[in-house]
């Protein structure tokens, strides 16, 4: 019985002691998904364009200064994500959340975009955050 208990503790505890960043990758993935959802809700609620830059270890959100503006200039500091864990990265994307709820590839809002942000840990994919431009859905 003691040997079984030691085996279970070793299986759970050793990866945490040697610095496996699996938990950091999962947390960063949740923060990225939450940031993208917040960007969509902010764009609709404030009727302004919200620009999102995802890349490396951070997500940066900015909002247009006034409704109908073609660019983003106000930083949304409270919303966003960042990680300092080594080996945890996200694929680069620039997304534009339109006031009507669509996700587009340009600030003009003509072309909806569909894709995924991939969260990697040491080069291996750990999470895929899918976004659907025609509906604004983020999964």
Image: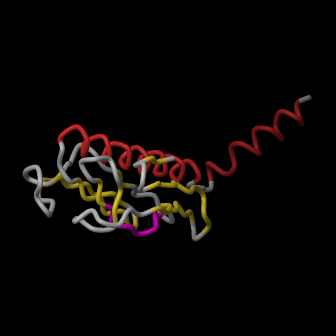
Q: Residue at x 54, y 64 (%)?
A: 120
Q: Say how the picture is coloured.
A: secondary structure
**Residue 74 percent location from the top left of the image:** 12, 53
Q: Judge left or right: residue 4 versus residue 19.
A: right
- Rendered-image quadrant of the N terminus: top right
Residue 20 in the magenta stretch? The answer is no
Q: Residue at x 83, y 33 (%)?
A: 5
Q: Judge left or right: residue 64 versus residue 56.
A: left
**Residue 129 percent location from the top left of the image:** 51, 54
Part of the protein shown in magenta:
89-95
- Judging depth in this view, the residue of 20 and 105 nearest the camera is 105
Tell me if residue 134 comes above or below residue 1 in the rendering.
below
Q: Residue at x 46, y 48 (%)?
A: 138
- Judging depth in this view, the residue of 106 and 33 nearest the camera is 106
| Image quadrant where residue 127 sits | bottom right
Residue 93 in the magenta stretch? The answer is yes
- Judging depth in this view, the residue of 71 and 35 nearest the camera is 71
Number of numbered discs on residues: 0
Per the picture, the main secondary structure of the magenta-coloured stretch is: strand
Outermost left residue: 66
Outermost top residue: 1
Q: Residue at x 20, y 48 (%)?
A: 77
**Residue 4 percent location from the top left of the image:** 88, 35
**Residue 30 percent location from the top left of the image:** 47, 45
Outermost right residue: 1
- Judging depth in this view, the residue of 109 and 9 nearest the camera is 109
Tell me if residue 70 comes above or below residue 130 in the rendering.
below
């Amino acid at each position: 019985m003691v040997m079984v208990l030691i085996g279970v503790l070793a299986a759970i505890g050793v990866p945490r002691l040697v610095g496996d960043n699996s938990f950091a990758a999962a947390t960063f993935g949740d923060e990225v998904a939450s940031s993208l959802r917040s960007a969509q809700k902010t764009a609709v609620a404030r009727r302004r364009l919200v620009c999102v830059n995802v890349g490396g270890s951070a997500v940066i959100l900015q909002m247009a200064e006034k409704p109908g503006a073609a660019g983003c200039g106000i930083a949304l500091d409270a919303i966003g994500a960042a990680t300092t864990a080594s080996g945890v990265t996200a694929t680069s994307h620039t997304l534009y959340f339109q006031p009507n709820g669509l996700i587009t590839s340009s600030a003009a809002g003509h072309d909806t975009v569909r894709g995924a942000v991939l969260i990697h840990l040491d080069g291996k994919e750990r999470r895929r955050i899918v976004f659907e431009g025609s509906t604004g859905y983020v999964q």
